Each structure stands twice: as structure tokens, then as C-alpha cells.
Amino acid sequence: MLRKGSIAAALFWLSAGWLVLALVTTGVLLTDLYSRTLDATLTDTLDFHVESLAGALLEAGDPQDDGIALADPRFERPRSGWYWIIRGEEGGLINLSTSVVGIDLPAVGAAADAMGRSTEVINDPFGTQLRMVERSVTLDDTTYRITVAGNLTEVLKLVADFRDQAFIVLGAVGIMLAVMSAIVGRIALRPIARLSKAVEAVREGESAEVTGTYPTEIAPLAEEVNELLRSNVQIIERARNQVGNLAHGLKTPIAVLRNEAHARKGALADIVASETEKMSNMVSTYLERARLAARTSVVGKKADATMIMLRLTRVMRKIHPDVTIAFQRPDASLPWFRGDEADFEEMAGNLLDNACKWSRGQVGVRLGSVRGEKGTQLLMRIDDNGPGLSEADAQKVLRRGVRLDEKTPGTGLGLDIVKELVDVYGGELELKRSQLGGLLVELRLPTARLGGLVRSPGN
């Protein structure tokens, strides 16, 4: 099927448009050529009849002799469109065919050509279009004007029939050529489709590089993609190393400054302690962002969300024994998460741990998929029967370090880390009112194909 915006569709419509133009032009030119040929044939036939009448006139000697006639029987039928007339030099009627009886045909008014022949197209009284040929013949010092008319309407009808049949045949040829063009286009573009699937397999984690044999036109593209993948891995590895070096290089001096400030008293020590604490938080924040960006930029990772959630719910039931966690396990058709397993576990673990901390003993977990503007997404819903959040508080808790209740253990960084990871993966995080009375957290993340993997049975 030709999809809008595809190369195959563009080639098909371009070929179809060109075929329509070429075939219509061909039909018009063929019809015109056929029309000219028939008209020339009719003119030659009439010219032959003029010469035959001139010969009969010479043989009879008397221009009014009844023996002057043409063998074609159409000149004997009234209203046949085939007529001949012999006039004197002054235009007086001398002899005529039976078909002309009762009809007033004018003389040809066109000028004679180099052969002394004049031709013109007129209509007879019955509406029949005629091609008339006239020539002057001199016998015994007497000049006669011989006029022969042929039925041009019959010729035009033949031309019309030819035109209709030609366009039917050309239309059939055009359809066959268009179908052939579509087939050729799809066959020619199959290597591009294979390359697309190979790149998709890399993105989905089914292959480490683009594999396969491709035509010389796109083989360099496949190699460039592989080079880009290798370069990306090298850049990410260097970034990880630099992040680690930066972490070790900054944390020690900041820790020394903090310890020195805490060991001393005074306004300067307080300022140094406060500023080093800010520096430590900023370093942690941006190092964490760099770590997340480097980790999630690796192409081809995916994780089984169902298995991870089964593992997390078992862990949370041990950490929060007073909380009932109900996990509705989805069927095997649920798509996998397209990303690092540790990242998904960190997001889901933070959200589930927060729900258990704030609930009044009941937490629900559901996994599913949803289609939207970004395609199919993995949907995680975690709700509890705790106090919930207002709309303003729901926006506030997503900020780094914000905690609405300082009595509850924690750093306040959990939801912000989740939000950072969600942003890196291009997902969505929403906080709503739960039907259980507390907070409902909806998390949407990109999905990956199963790629032939089979889930292990879980509890």
C-alpha cells in the first residue's frame, strides 16, 4: 500500500502524472496524424476522379454526353455526399452526376495551387461536410471546370472512432505501466525498507549494529550509521569517565571545606558551611543529570516492566509490612520499556515507596499501554488511600528537595529524580486524585518490541 509522504508514493504519482501527460499527448498526435492521412487520401481520391472525368470528357468529345460518368456508385445516390459537376469557364452548368440533381453546389473559391488544383471544405444542404477539389481543363480551346466533392463527414467519423479506440487502448497501456511503475518502485525500494528495519532493530535492542547486504547506492549510509553508533558509544564512555573524574575531583575539596567550616566558629565559618552545602547540592544535581543523560543515551536497551514490578512489589511488602500492595499483572502482550532496566526500577521504586509511605495501608499498582501523539507508551498507575495532594502541592513536590512533611524520612529528591529520568526518556509524569482517596501517579514511558523474548513466569 502506498502511504502518503513515502518515496514509493512520490515515484508512483510522478510516473502516473507523466504517463497521463505522455499518453494524452500521444493520443492527440496519433489522432491528428490519422486525420491528416485520411484527409490526404480523400483529396488524392477526389483528384483521381477529376482526372478520370477529364479523360472521359476528352474521349466523349461532347461535354454534355450522358456517357461521361464515374464507376463509383456513390455518385449515383442522392444525398451521398459524393458529387461531381462540369461547368463552363463562365460558370455555366454543363454536366453533373445523378447525386447532384436538385442540389446547388457552389464552385470552389480557393486559389489554385501550383498544379492548378483548388480545394475547399463546405457543407451541402443536408449538413454533410464535403471536401471539394476543382481543376480547370482545356479541350479544343474550350476551358472546363471540373469539380468533385467527397463526403468529409465519413472521414471525421472514422477519425472520432479511431480517437476513442486509441484512448481506450492507451488508457489500458497507461494503467499497466502505472502498475508496473508501482511494482518496480516497491521492488527498488526494498533495500531501504530493509535498512529501516535494521536501524529499528538497533534502536529496539535486537542488534548492536546495522547488518545486511545493501546496494551500492545505500551501502555507504548503512556503514555511516554503524560508524555513528560506534562513535556514540565512545563519546558516552568518555562522558562517563569524565563524570566519574569530576565527581572524585570536586567532592573531596568540598568535603574538606565543609569539615573545616564545621570545626570553626564565627560568621565566616557559617558562610563557608552554607555555601559549601549549596555547592555540594549543585554538584550532586548536575552530576546526577549527566549520569542519567549518559546512561539513557545508549541505543538498544529495553526492560521487562512486568518482571521489575513483580520484584519491586515483593520488596516493598517486606519494607512496608503494614501496607497492602495490589498489583494487577498485565498479560504477555504488554510492550517492554525502551530504556535501561535500572532507570525503570529507580522510577518505579521511588513512586511505589512514596505511595507506601503516605498511604493508610492500601496501594494499587497497574501496568498497561496507551496510544497517543508519541505512539504506543507504557502506562504505569500507582494510587494510594493516603491524604493525597492539592493541585498546587502536586506541582510543588516535583521540584528538587521539596518536602511537604519534614517528619517523614527522606531527602525530598525521589520524585525529582523520577522527573529527571522521565524527561530524559521523553515520557510524562502526572499527579492526580485517586479513586482510593489519595494520590494517583500516572507515568508514561516509551515502549520497545518484545523481539521474540519470552517472559519468565512470576508470582
Image (tube, helix red, strand yellow):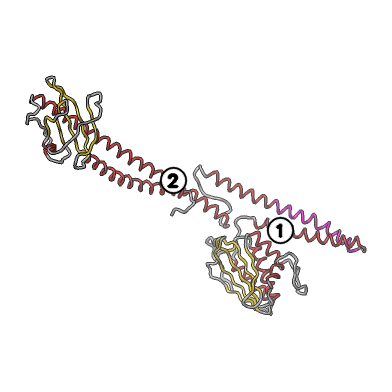
Answer left or right for 36 relative to 410.
left
Please check the rendered image and state whether residue 428 is part of the magenta-colored stretch, yes or no: no
Q: Point out residue 183 in the picture as x, y percentages from the top left corner.
A: 41, 49
Residue at left 58%, top 48%? 225
Mark 2 Cα-neighbour bin, 10 Å: few <14, some 14–19, many ≥20: some
Q: Mark 1 or mark 2: which comes first in sequence?
A: 2
Q: Which residues are magenta?
A: 238-263
Marker disc for residue 350:
none
Q: Point out residue 422 in the picture as x, y percentages from the top left corner.
A: 65, 62
Q: CA distance from mark 1 to mark 2?
A: 49 Å
Indicate the quadrant containing the C terminus: top left, top right, bottom left or bottom right. Answer: bottom right
Residue at left 61%, top 50%? 229
**Disc nearest the viewer among 1 and 2:** 2
Q: Point out residue 391 in the picture as x, y percentages from the top left corner.
A: 68, 70
Mark 1 Cα-neighbour bin, 10 Å: few <14, some 14–19, many ≥20: some
Tell which residue pokes out farthest to the top in this image: 141
The quarter holding residue 268 reads: bottom right
Residue at left 86%, top 59%? 257
**Residue that label 2 marks:** 14
In this view, 284 is above or below 362? above
Answer left or right for 289 relative to 97.
right
